[in-house]
């Protein structure tokens, strides 16, 4: 039976835009209490917009959407943010660890700073948020964590070794967490999307390919689309509906790294 999210607290990182914002909107539409986290201050406007919409929809129930401006690479700040979430919205049932960042450079030009940045945002940030969420999930003996890896975390991408490595680590961390927290009935999975159109990551990657591969933007899109068996790039909704499934229906799934790639990645 599907989990009824009404009254349950769901946290989404990277919620100011793109996939994270789509996940926050989906959780709101299911009646959850939603905490939206992002380093980008626009998360406040987005959360206020959703709170208003929700308030109108659930007349009298009061808005239960809060925006938090937070750098997830700061463990202390993450813990104090989750304390505030628990105090104001209740124990955390679901965490969608969407925040991430991409970088491109020739392998031999990777600097310590850029390698470190990829790891801090994509690995450390997700780990700190999961640690904070687990405090209350373990108390509830129930919970869902959805980490964000990438197709590049399974089959690494050219000129993206640092990003690919960080996303590969997220897959292994997901396995380890699934083993460790199964006894607490907490399911931990991750998603490995392919290219998701109209997102920050693809915006930055496609720009990089235009510059590095000396191709026009249309040509880049055409080339990458042609590699996808289903013949189109991924849409934000394709990813959001998978997060929805793992949150409310994926009761017997843990430790999995699901491809959302239109068949581009099959293992
Ligand atoms: N878009 C794609 O094609 C694609 C493909 C595979 C995997 N992914 C993964 O999906 C996730 C979302 O991708 P997207 O394209 O929606 O990203 P995006 O760049 O559009 O949005 C990411 C959000 O994370 C926030 N963020 C970055 N660093 C942060 C920090 N230190 N603290 C708090 N927030 C921070 C950003 O401000 C931004 O709002 C990422 O983890 C990404 O690696 C994306």
Image (tube, grey):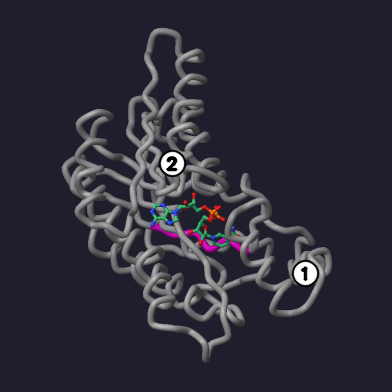
How many residues crowd around disc 1 within 10 Å: few (fewer than 14), some, or many (20 or more)?
some
- Check residue 162 for magenta coloring: no
N-terminal label among 1 and 2: 2
Q: Is residue 75 visible?
A: yes
**The N terminus - image quarter:** top left
Q: Nearer the viewer, mark 1 or mark 2?
A: 2
Query: Disc 2 beta carbon < 8 A from ligand 1?
Result: no
Q: Is residue 90 above or below residue 251?
A: above
**Which of the labelled discs sits on residue 41, or is there none?**
2
Query: Disc 1 beta carbon < 8 A from ligand 1?
Result: no
**For the magenta stretch, what is the residue range?**
189-194
Q: Which residue is mark 1?
A: 220
Q: Residue drawn 24% across and 28% down? A: 88
How many residues crowd around disc 2 within 10 Å: few (fewer than 14), some, or many (20 or more)?
some
Q: Is residue 190 above or below residue 152?
A: above
Residue 166 position by quadrant: bottom left
Depth order, front residue of 13/152: 13
Q: Is residue 1 visible?
A: no
Q: Position of residue 25 (x, y in %)?
A: 52, 34
**Which of the labelled discs sits on residue 139, or is there none?**
none
Q: Position of residue 29 (x, y in %)?
A: 51, 28
Total count of labels:
2
Dot 2 lies on which element?
loop
Q: Residue drawn 39% across and 77% down? A: 113
Main SS of the magenta segment?
Answer: strand
Q: Position of residue 52 (x, y in %)?
A: 48, 19
Q: Position of residue 255 (x, y in %)?
A: 38, 63
Q: Residue drawn 76% across and 58% down? A: 232
């Amino acid at each position: 039976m599907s989990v009824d999210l009404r009254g349950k607290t769901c946290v989404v990182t990277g919620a100011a835009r793109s996939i994270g914002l789509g996940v926050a909107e989906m959780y709101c539409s299911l009646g959850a209490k939603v905490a939206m986290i992002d380093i980008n201050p626009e998360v406040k406007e987005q959360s206020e917009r959703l709170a208003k919409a929700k308030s109108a929809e659930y007349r009298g129930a009061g808005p239960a959407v809060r925006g938090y401006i937070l750098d997830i690479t700061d463990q202390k700040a993450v813990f104090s943010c989750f304390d505030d979430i628990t105090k104001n919205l209740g124990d955390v049932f679901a965490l969608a660890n969407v925040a991430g960042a991409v970088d491109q450079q020739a392998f031999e030009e990777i600097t310590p700073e850029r390698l470190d940045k990829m790891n801090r945002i994509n690995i450390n940030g997700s780990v700190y948020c999961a640690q904070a969420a687990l405090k209350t999930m373990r108390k509830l003996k129930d919970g869902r964590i959805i980490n964000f890896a990438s197709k590049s975390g399974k089959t690494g991408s050219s000129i993206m070794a640092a990003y690919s490595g960080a996303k590969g680590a997220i897959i292994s961390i997901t396995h380890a967490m699934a083993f460790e927290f199964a006894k607490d009935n907490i399911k931990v999975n991750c998603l490995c999307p392919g290219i998701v159109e109209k997102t920050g990551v693809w915006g930055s990657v496609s720009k990089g390919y235009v510059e590095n591969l000396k191709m026009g933007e249309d040509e880049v899109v055409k080339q990458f689309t042609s590699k996808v068996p289903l013949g189109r790039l991924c849409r934000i909704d394709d990813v959001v509906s998978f997060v929805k499934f793992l949150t409310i229906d994926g009761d017997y799934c843990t430790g999995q790294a699901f491809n959302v790639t239109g068949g581009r990645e099959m293992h």
